[in-house]
């Protein structure tokens, strides 16, 4: 069973998706981290971030791998090829670099395959922009998380402050608006409310309320449609086009 959680930058997807995965006992896949890893790797090598063919050639044979810290239930470390990217992908430079990279159709095709391969079996909470619309259009539950852009900027500013990252509200607000524009207006897999998605506007909700809302919906779907184990052994890619043999994503 797949729970797809899409929404704009700063809508709280990551913390909510992780909490939902923990409460449901599901795996967790952060697809934004995959685009971020490619963007950071390409930036470090001076690759043109809007050159889809170059990005594809660069990323094609590098494995994106998520790894667990000892004792962790959800993976928190990200590797791209041999490089650990965990902290590098959360900087303002990464925020800027990832928009053009994620808009490249050539790269999105490869990412789609990797994401489907990762989430093919088992119970997954998958977060991103196009999970319910493109990657897993048959997801058992699709959530579209939103919040006013000012509220998202306030939350991101607080989050960055706690992590020791730049936390200027105005700069963050402008960056979020820029990414919203990019994500919603790109030609391939733009950010949109997927067919059948439940919209959850979190502007005036606490994080706990958001998590409870999604866990309640997910539990109801699991009991009604997928059975008590969420259809854990089912093929989540059933009915979707074949996955090419040469993709190489994996969870450690
Ligand atoms: O969720 P995030 O902020 O980590 O995502 C980083 C970027 O990657 C964001 O600008 C949009 C893009 N993205 C995407 O295009 N499709 C996804 N499934 C996930 C993220």
Image (spheres, helix red, strand yellow):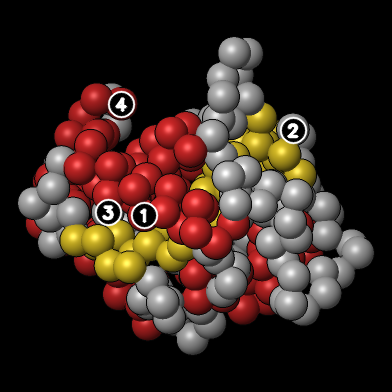
Q: Is residue 187 above or below residue 62?
A: below
For the C terminus, the quadrant is top right
SS at badge 4: helix
Q: What residue sits 12% from the left and 55% below the top?
A: 203
Could you say where residue 169 lies in the image, as x and y percent from the top left? Answer: 12, 46
Left or right relative to 127: residue 106 = right
Label 1 vs 4, first from the N-terminus: 4
Look at the numbered discs 4 and 3 and tell me whether their residues touch, using CB distance below 8 Å: no
Spatial distance from mark 1 to mark 4, Cα to Cα?
A: 32 Å
Label 2 vs 3, first from the N-terminus: 3
Return the mark for residue 11: 3
The residue that label 4 is drawn on is 163
Left or right relative to 231: residue 201 = left
Q: Nearer the viewer, residue 51 or 132?
A: 132
SS at badge 2: loop
Return the mark for residue 252: 2
Q: Nearer the viewer, residue 239 or 102?
A: 239
Which numbered disc, 4 or 3, marks the residue closer to the eye? 3
Which numbered disc, 1 or 3, marks the residue closer to the eye? 1
Label 2 vs 1, first from the N-terminus: 1
Q: What residue sits 24% from the left and 61% below the top?
A: 200
Left or right relative to 134: residue 168 = left
Q: Is residue 34 visible?
A: no
Instruction: Check disc 2: other Cα within 10 Å, few if <14, some if 14-19, many if 20+.
Output: few
Q: What residue sits 83% from the left and 59% below the top?
A: 247
The residue that label 1 is drawn on is 217
Spatial distance from mark 2 to mark 3, Cα to Cα?
A: 28 Å
Q: Is residue 232 above or below residue 133?
A: above
Q: What residue sits 28% from the left and 42% below the top?
A: 212
Could you say where residue 121 lies in the image, as x and y percent from the top left? Answer: 73, 52
SS at badge 1: helix
């Amino acid at each position: 069973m797949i729970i797809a959680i899409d929404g704009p930058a700063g809508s709280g997807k990551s913390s909510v998706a992780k909490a939902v995965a923990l409460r449901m006992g599901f795996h967790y896949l952060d697809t934004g981290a995959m685009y971020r890893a490619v963007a950071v790797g390409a930036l470090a090598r001076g690759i043109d971030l809007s050159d889809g063919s170059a990005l594809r050639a660069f990323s094609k044979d590098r494995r994106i791998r998520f790894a667990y810290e000892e004792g962790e239930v959800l993976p928190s470390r990200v590797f791209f090829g041999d490089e650990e990217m965990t902290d590098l992908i959360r900087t303002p430079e990464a925020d800027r670099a990832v928009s053009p990279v994620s808009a490249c159709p050539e790269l999105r095709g490869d990412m789609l395959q990797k994401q489907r391969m990762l989430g093919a079996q088992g119970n997954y909470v998958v977060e991103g922009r196009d999970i319910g619309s493109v990657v897993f259009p048959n997801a058992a539950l699709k959530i579209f998380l939103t919040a006013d852009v000012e509220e998202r900027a306030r939350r991101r500013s607080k989050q960055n402050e706690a992590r020791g990252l730049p936390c200027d509200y105005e700069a963050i607000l402008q960056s979020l608006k820029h990414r919203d524009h990019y994500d919603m207006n790109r030609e391939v897999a733009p950010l949109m409310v997927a067919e059948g998605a439940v919209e959850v506007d979190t502007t005036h909700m606490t994080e706990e309320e958001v998590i409870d809302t999604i866990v309640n919906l997910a539990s109801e779907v699991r009991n009604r449609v997928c059975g008590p184990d969420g259809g854990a052994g089912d093929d989540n890619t059933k009915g979707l086009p074949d996955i090419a043999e040469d993709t190489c994503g994996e969870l450690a």
